Each structure stands twice: as structure tokens, then as C-alpha cells.
Image (cartoon, rainbow, N blue to C red):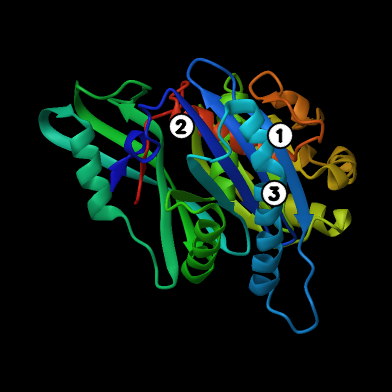
Amino acid sequence: MSFITGLFRKEKKTESVVLIDVSASSVAGAYVRYAEDEMPTLLYTRHLPIEIRANEPRERAMLRALTILGDALICEGAPVLLRATGSGTADTILVSVNAPWQTTSVRTEYFEGETSFLFTKQLVAETLKQTSFAPPGKMLADESIIGTILNGYETHDPYGKNAHRASIVILTSLIDKKVVESINVLVRKIFHTKYVISIAGSSLRYQAMRAAFSHERDALILDATELFTAIALVRRDLLVNVADIPSPTNDPAAWLAKVSFALAELAERFPLPRTIFLLAREQDSAGLREALDAAKFGTLWLSDNPPKIISVQGSHIGNMVRQATTVIPDLQILLMALYYSRRAFGYGILDAYAHT
């Protein structure tokens, strides 16, 4: 285990990064240039569908599409990077792996003593080392501390302070071990580098959304960027629950029924925030937004006033990621670019840890 600052080599002043998003239906990639105290610049992006042949496992079709994407990034993207930076070689590869090959969970670890104790990074690191767990067939890709509470108060600067009690909220990424190993072997071969970082897509997008909409302290995030949807419940800036919805987004009516059921289950345990962020692919966004607008949510919010629904677009991220490409990038790629800038260059993101 190592601190995220070590994993992302924070001492670098500039860095060229390849972003790769792997989902059940498509793969996407991009070259991004990072410089300290500057917005990341998206230089090149490419998106390809996954075409599954008869009786072919989805994983094999995904790896074939990823190979084609990698060739495009090398043949088309690397020259763009070379013209922009003087080098066509990337320093880091960040891979976001989505359903059905990833899961995300949240847990809370508690610290308490009979007398006051010093809350330190070492104390947290030792606790994570003892409590981290990956079931058979899964790889623990990332554990991020997304909230810290000392003596009952949330704080973003907890280390070196005395406390009688403390707790940390941890977001965990688990990825199918065989799939991520196959992806890493392929990516390292294409880009001739061993420096590949993997993370579950839903974990990455949640953390990027909290950076993009930090003023919304209470919200529901409907992540429908893939065939299946995840709902994240945020209260007082803390992630308190993640729910997965096994319903494809290509059927808005069936999707809404599943979303409504999941929200009803959440409402039995928590008051629901009145802001809903919808993350969806461009071709699905309008239909899903229309379904949400038509839904009768009054009983869940105990009010005749509908919740505020914000359909997140690339323009919402435009003031945090500069686009130098003429191709409109996927929302997932923009959120990946934002996530990496916050994590690697420390622009206000919470401290975190990762497994190497």
C-alpha cells in the first residue's frame, strides 16, 4: 500500500497521460497534457464500439476493440502529443474499468480511545492495511478516503490533530482480476510502459463529480453511462450509500421502474436529497432525462415539488478541462481527465491511498 501522492508521482511539474475507458459496449481513449497550476488539456480522443461475434465472450471482444483503440492512439494520437509537447510518449496510463467487470463499495472505519490520541497518516495506513480485503477472483484496485470526521465534525485537514474519536469513509474499487490483468498486459505492450493505473469507473466518476460540483453537499448521482446504472447517495459531502441497478439504459421505461424501486429502498433508510445528477451517454441522455421528468416521485420526497434533475454535459466540465481536440469527447473521458488532475496534482481532492 502506498499514499496516492506516491502512486501518481506528484513531484512531476508536467505530465502526459493516456486515459482509457473500458465498458461493456465500448472503449474510449485520450491523450491529456497536465501542468502544475494549469487546467489539463485534452489533445486527442477516440471512441470505438465493442462488436461481439457469434458465441464470443464479451471479454475477448473487448480486448479486440482495445487493441484497435491502442493502435489508433499510437498512430494518430501520439503525433498530436508530439506536436503539442515535443514528445510522443506518455508518462502514465490510467485505465477505468466499468461493469460488468467492476464493483464499488463504501465502508466506514472508526477510531476511538479512552484518552485523546493523535490522528496521523500512519494510523490510517495501518488500519487500511488490516481491513482491506479482496474476494477470490477480484483485484483491489483503489481505496480512496472520501471523508474524515474528527470529534463529530467533518474535516478536510485531519492529520496531526488530537481527537477522542474519529472515522474515515473509504471508497473501494474491485475489478475482475483476470480481466484487469489481460487489459494491463495489452496496454503495456501497446505503449511500452509498466506504469498503468487501474480503477473502477463508478468510483472514478463519483470522485470527479464531487470535484466538479463541490457546492452540492447533498445529492443523488445516477451514473447511467454504461448498460447498468449505479446510484450514489451523498449527504453533507459524504458518500453514504452506493446501489447498483441491473437494468439496461436502452429501455427507459424499464430503467425508470428499477431506478424508482432503488430510490424507494434508499428513502426507507435516508432522507433523499432534492438534487439528482444524471450521467449518461449523449445518445441516451435525452430519453433518460425525459423518463425522470415524467416520473411521480412525490411519495419518495413527501412533497409535490419534484427534485431538481441536472443532466451533466461536457459543458459542465469545460471550465476545468481545456479541449484542444475538434472531436467532442465522451463525458467519461472528461471526468477521467478531471479526476486525474485532482489526484495527481492535488487540486483540492481529499487525501487517498491505493494499492500497488
The residue pinned by badge 1 equals 276
Q: Secondary structure at mark 3?
A: helix
Q: Nearer the viewer, residue 163 or 142?
A: 142
- Which mark is first along the chain, 1 or 2? 1
The residue pinned by badge 2 equals 343
Amino acid marked by disc 3: Cys
- Which mark is first along the chain, 3 or 2? 3
Amino acid marked by disc 1: Ile
Q: Position of residue 97 (x, y in %)?
A: 58, 55
Residue drawn at x 67%, y 57% is 23
Residue drawn at x 71%, y 34% is 276
CA–CA distance in space, label 2 to label 3:
29 Å
Q: Secondary structure at mark 2?
A: helix
Drawn side of residue 306 relative to residue 140, left or right: right
User: Which disc is residue 75 wearing?
Assistant: 3
Please determine whether, in this image, residue 179 is positioned above or below residue 279.
below
Q: Disc 3, disc 1: CB below 8 Å? A: no
Q: Nearer the viewer, residue 185 or 208?
A: 185
User: Which residue is situated farthest in the left direction here?
Assistant: 115
User: Which residue is situated farthest in the top direction here?
Assistant: 37
Q: Disc 2, disc 1: CB below 8 Å? A: no
Drawn side of residue 140 relative to residue 302, left or right: left
Residue drawn at x 58%, y 27% is 85
Q: Is residue 269 visible?
A: no
* Nearest to viewer (mark 2 / mark 3): 3
Mark 3 surroundings within 10 Å by alpha-carbon count, few (fewer than 14), some (14 through 19), many (20 or more): few
CA–CA distance in space, label 2 to label 1:
25 Å
Q: Position of residue 192 (x, y in %)?
A: 49, 54
